[in-house]
Image (cartoon, rainbow, N blue to C red):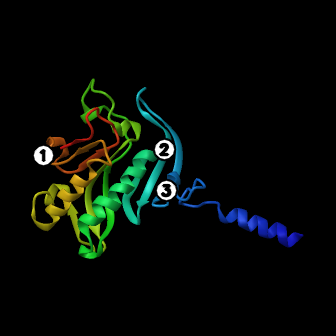
Amino acid sequence: MRFLSIAACAALLAGCGDDDASDGRGGLCGDPRLKGEVVGRVPGELPACGIDDAVRLTSVSGVTLSQGALVDCPTARRFADWVDRGAKPAIGNHGGGIESLQIAAHYVCRSRNHLVGAPVSEHGKGKAIDISGITLADGESMTVLNDWGRGRHGRSLARMHGAACGPFGTVLGPGSDALHRDHFHFDTARHGNGAYCR
């Protein structure tokens, strides 16, 4: 009897402290590609800000994030779709493949483009993530600021940017405006006529 109690406790404790924050369906947000932790409700400083069911992503489809990204589950799943169908194929086996993504921004309660009186940014709702660069397994890196439109890295970045249009409702990067010259902005906002990609 005592052996059963110890075995039961060991089995119970084996699931504690799991960085994957599994929700019973496999992985974070029910998606085995997502690693991180469940955060729960994040209140906003402004009435339109906040996330009801936030997660902090640390890895997506085996690709490490430079910092934990606070987003909602639909955005996390779309991000994983983009990593699998956009980022990884754009790089292929070059440099051993993608090791990590440089996260420029995730959740922050602010207005769109930091403009006074503008609507709350999708960042303030946990529905946006910004990427500024990629590090490959061999240590080589590329950034949107330095490599966009230049050589092999520029072509890879352009393919990544294009592949985000569809999984994400808004895709911005160099050429959209001066604020996005050094990063890609992806968010899950929906627009009446489909995705807005620039």
In the image, taking residue 47 as reference, residue 164 lies left or right, namely: left
Q: Which of marks 2 and 1 precedes in the sequence? A: 2
Figure quadrant of the C terminus: top left
Q: Are marks 1 and 3 in contact (CB under 8 Å)?
A: no
**Frontmost residue, 26 versus 151:** 26
Q: Are marks 1 and 2 in contact (CB under 8 Å)?
A: no
Query: Can you identify the residue that label 2 sits on?
Result: 54
Disc number placed over residue 198 in the picture, else none: none
Q: Are marks 3 and 2 in contact (CB under 8 Å)?
A: no
Query: Can you identify the residue that label 1 sits on?
Result: 175
Give the spatial CA distance, label 1 vs label 2.
31 Å
Q: Quadrant of residue 187?
A: top left
Question: Which residue is painted at 52% across and 58% down in the image?
Answer: 27
Query: Where in the figure is residue 6, as x and y percent of width and height?
Result: 80, 69
Query: Where in the figure is residue 104, as x and y percent of width and height?
Result: 29, 51
Q: Which of marks 3 and 1 precedes in the sequence? A: 3
Query: Can you identify the residue that label 3 sits on?
Result: 31
Give the spatial CA distance, label 1 vs label 3.
33 Å
Reply above or below: 188 against 45.
Answer: below
Name the amino acid, label 2: Ala
Q: Quadrant of residue 193?
A: top left
Question: Which residue is painted at 35% across and 40% down in the image?
Answer: 123
Name the amino acid, label 1: Gly
Q: Residue furthest left?
A: 150
Query: Where in the figure is residue 29, as x and y percent of width and height?
Result: 51, 51
Dot 1 falls on a residue whose secondary structure is: loop
In the image, taking residue 128 as reference, residue 148 lies left or right, namely: left
- Crowd rating for badge 2 (residues with CA inside 10 Å; few <14, some 14–19, many 20+): many
